[in-house]
Image (cartoon, grey):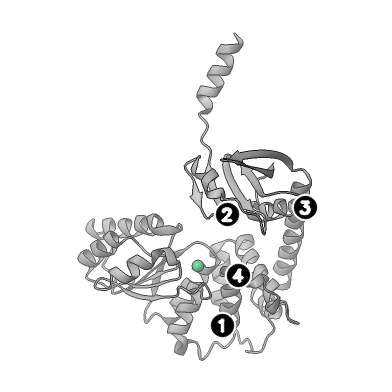
Amino acid sequence: MKTTLIVTHTDLDGVMAGLTATQTSQSDATILYAEAGAPGIDAVLQQVLDDIEAGKLRKPAHVMLLDNTPSMQMLMQFNQVTGVQPVVYDHHVSNAPVWAEATTVARFITDDTGTSSATELVFKDQRAAFTTLPFWQTLVTLTNLYDTWMWQDAAYDDDVATGSTAQVLNEVLYFLGRERFSTRITAAKEASISSNEKPRDLLTKIFSPVIMGLVDDRMAANAAYVLKKAEAAEFGDLTIGDTTYHYAYVTASKQMSEIGNALTSLQDVDFGLVINNGALSFRVAKDKDVDVSLVAAAFNGGGHAKASGAKLRLDWPAILQQAVTTEN
Ligand SMILES: [Mn+2]
C-alpha cells in the first residue's frame, strides 16, 4: 500500500473530492471507491483491515475518508488496528451523531448547512496546494453547485452558464466513466490553463471539443427520453387514511429522478412514481402534501417525505411455476 489511503464515494462529488485530495497528499495515494452511506464505506474499510491482517497490505500512514462517514464501530476498529486517525470530510448531516462522538478516533471536517460539497471541504482545507492550479477553483465551484442542487438556482443562470455547466460536468463523468474522467482531470494539472477561463471553455480544454459534443448529444437524447416517458404516463389513485391521492406512473430504464420530476408537473398529480426493473422511485409535486416515505416503507424502502424509494422483489421462479401450474 502507498502511504496515503483515500476512500471516497462514486458520484461526481466523491470523484472530484478524491482528485482534489490527491493533489494535497504528501505522497502517492491509493484511492478506493465506496457506495453511499456507512454500510458502503464500512465494507471498503473492512476489506482494507482484512488485507492488512493477511499481510497483503501495509498499514497506511495517512487516511482521508471523503463524502462519506463510516459507522462509529468501524472508526474505532480501524483506529485500533492501524493506529491512524482518519480525516473525514463529509456533508451528509445524517452522520452528525458520529462526527460528534468519534472525536478520539478520527478528525472531522464537515458542513451541516447543505451548501458545501465534500470536494469544497477538501479544497478549502488544503487551498495552499492549489496556488499553481488556479482553474481548480472553477471545477470545485461546478462540483459544489451540482452536488448541493444549487446549480438550478436562478443566481447561477449567469452569462457564462455556470449552473448548466455544472450539470454538464456531471454528465461528462458518466459518459467517460471514472477512470477516463480522472485521467483527463489529472492531465489538466500539467497543462497550462489560465485562471479566468469560462466554465464551459475550461471543460472543453480538459475533455476536448469532441467529447463535449458527444455529451451535449447525450443530454439532448436524455431530455427527449424524459419528455417521451412523461407523455406515456398512466394514472392511479391511492387512499392513505382519509385522503385519496392522484398519481402518475411510468416504467423507465434511466433518468429516474428527472422523469419523476416531469411526472409531478402533470395536471392534478400529487406524486409521481417511476418503476425501473422493480425499483420504485416516488416524488411529490411542488406544493402538494403527501408523505411518500410511508408508501416506500410499505415496500421496506424509505427516504424523505417528498422523495423516497423502494425495491420490489418478485420471486420469478415461484411466479412462473404458479402460472404454469394454474394453467395446466
Ligand atoms: Mn457529496
Q: CA distance from mark 2 to mark 3?
A: 20 Å
Q: Residues within 10 Å of mark 1 (few under 14, many from 20)?
A: many
Whole-number angstrom distance, CA of label 2 to CA of label 1? 33 Å
**Mark 2 in CB contact with mark 3 (< 8 angstroms):** no
In terms of secondary structure, where does tag 1 sit? helix
> From this viewpoint, which residue is outermost toward the front?
242
For the point 75% across and 67% down, which residue is it? 213
Whether residue 301 sits left or right of residue 234 in the image: it is left
Rounded to the nearest whole Å, what is the CA distance between mark 3 and mark 1? 35 Å
The one nearer the camera, 267 or 208, is: 267
The residue under label 3 is 227
Q: Which residue is mark 2?
A: 307
Residue 89 drawn at (x, y percent): 41, 73
Q: Secondary structure at mark 2?
A: strand
Residue assigned mark 1:
136
Which residue bears the numbered disc 4?
146
Q: Nearer the viewer, residue 102 or 80?
A: 102
